[in-house]
Amino acid sequence: MAFDGLFIHSLLTTLTPTLVSGRLSKIYQPFDQDLVLVFRKERKNQQLLISANAQYPRMYLTKQTIANPDKAPTFVMVLRKYLEGSVLKSIEQIGLDRIVNFHFSNRNELGDQVQLVLSVELMGRHSNVIFYDQESGKIIDLLKRINPDENRARILLPRAKYELPPLKPGINGLNLTEKEFEELKRQNPLPSDFVRKMDGLDRDDRMELEGYLEDEFSFASFQTFFEQFNHPKAFVLKTPRNKRKIFPYLPYHLDLEKESSDPDLNHALDEFYEYQANRDWVKQRAAKVERVVKNEQKKLTKKIAKLQKHLDLAENSEGYRIRGEILNANLYQVKPGMTEVDLPNYYDNNRPLKVKLDPALSPARNAQKYFTRYKKLRDSIKHVHEQIKIAQANLAYFDSIQTAIDNADPQDIDQINEELQNQGYIRKPQKHVRRKKITESNLNKFKLSSGKTVFVGKNNYQNDWLTLKKANKNDYWFHVKNMPGSHVILRDDQPTPEDIKEAAEIAAFFSKGKLSAHVQVDYVQDKRVKKPNGAKPGFVIYTGQNSIEVTPKEKSVMSKRID
């Protein structure tokens, strides 16, 4: 189900007691449409993520480590000015709509008490976070400023009067009395019509409530359904097409298969959205890098095809030499002004061979032209082979960058961007930015069934650091065979066959072949891995390796991951 009104009501049953009366200590905007508010209460920090993402607007307490960007956007600067250090007085949902108001109390520059509201509207593509003064009702600033031409229902700009968006009328089932229920039932005798009158339900909730009322069209059945939202738990279920959905109750009337449950709705939401949010944040941060990678891949693919065409022509250039020789042997048969002539081909039982001519040149010069073209093509073969090899190496390099982006966490994109700057593919900023040191905390870590530790690099800089600096010489190094992927180090000098298999599965998962059923993985002791002088980041050579074929399975691999 989506973040509908009832889901938000369920979430606030735990969010409100956790955050209210807490002091807002930090505010930052890690990505374009996401805010993080850090509250301090009872000597504990609570990190609230608010996302106005059009596809999955949401909010919940998160344990994820989300990097604070070096430069704060304007909206965050405004929030820090007015809200940092303020106390959260209350959290209020507007009816059962997808609007939640956070009421803060703070003092202005004159020391006067002011009441401020941060309004979170989780309404699909119209999602927004609006900050306004409660007394005047004037908007101070907002996450998404909307041009009046794009939204004629209300003005969403600083200094405009805050107004609620147009809301559809509906009945709050949480407050419905038995008498009101019976009257509504009399007016709407069909459960489907009755359910349409309710507010705050998405399609799944409506179908579930309809199922309850078809089983027993009574106030008790109606109450049983709504009471679940006052005491929520979390249930993750799958559709027949394996789409995952999260509910604050366990539905019985939907065609869904239960995957997991969690007594803590916030914790479940954090895990449920972790992968999708991570991919979205990576996509936002990597947009510029991906454009460069896609353009370079496109250019190199075209270049290789063009060079291959030239190579095919060069390797089949004997025809030019044969025409030159036959023309030299039959100069007397060529008349001035001829554009072509049929001559006996003594390489093919004197069968006629059509030879094209330039009428502006003499017969001897025409023959020489064929020899020159032949020599030029033959001489180019070595050079073209070298150019194809270089282009293929560069294409493999950009494939490795794309694989790194696919495996990256948001904070890893800066390293990938820096790598492309150093390689000359992205212009360096005028202001020098100190390169952040790579540490063990940057890597992915896994614990095998035997308890042994595996480290995984997520980009070329991390791969080089892991393989050439972090690893001990007797540790085992893993990498997929002949395709881009992460460097993987197993911290052990005598791994068992099961250790090798599990480490190889991890290496296969963090590679371009992660969706393949059969992936070849090479493994060798780290001391046999070398980096050639002048090689691009992430490129190494190795000898004496063994190979194993594995099938990477996400669930199996990720269950071994440790923070």
Image (spheres, rainbow, N blue to C red):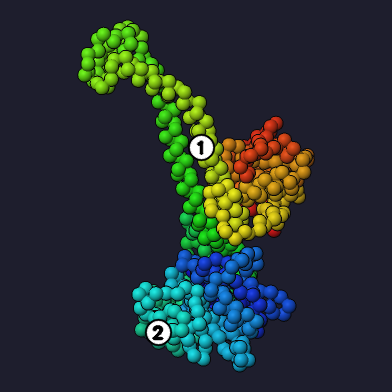
Q: Amino acid at mark 2?
A: Leu
Q: Is residue 400 left or right of residue 163?
A: right
**Residue 72 versus residue 554: which sits nearer the camera?**
72
Q: Is residue 271 left or right of residue 288?
A: right
Callout 2: SS: helix
Residue 375 circle label: none
Q: Residue at x 44, y 86 (%)?
A: 161
**Badge 1: how crowded within 10 Å, few (<14), some, or many (20+)?**
many
Q: Amino acid at mark 1?
A: Ala
Q: Residue at x 54, y 44 (%)?
A: 399
Q: Residue under circle 2?
A: 184
Callout 1: SS: helix
Residue 391 circle label: 1
Q: Cα distance, mark 1 to mark 2?
A: 72 Å
**Badge 2: how crowded within 10 Å, few (<14), some, or many (20+)?**
some
Q: Is residue 23 visible?
A: yes
Instruction: Name the N-terminal-most of marks 1 and 2.
Output: 2
Q: Residue at x 55, y 66 (%)?
A: 31
**Residue 467 versus residue 254: which sits nearer the camera?**
467
Percent x, y of residue 204: 46, 68
Q: Quadrant of the C terminus?
A: bottom right
Percent x, y of residue 513: 56, 43
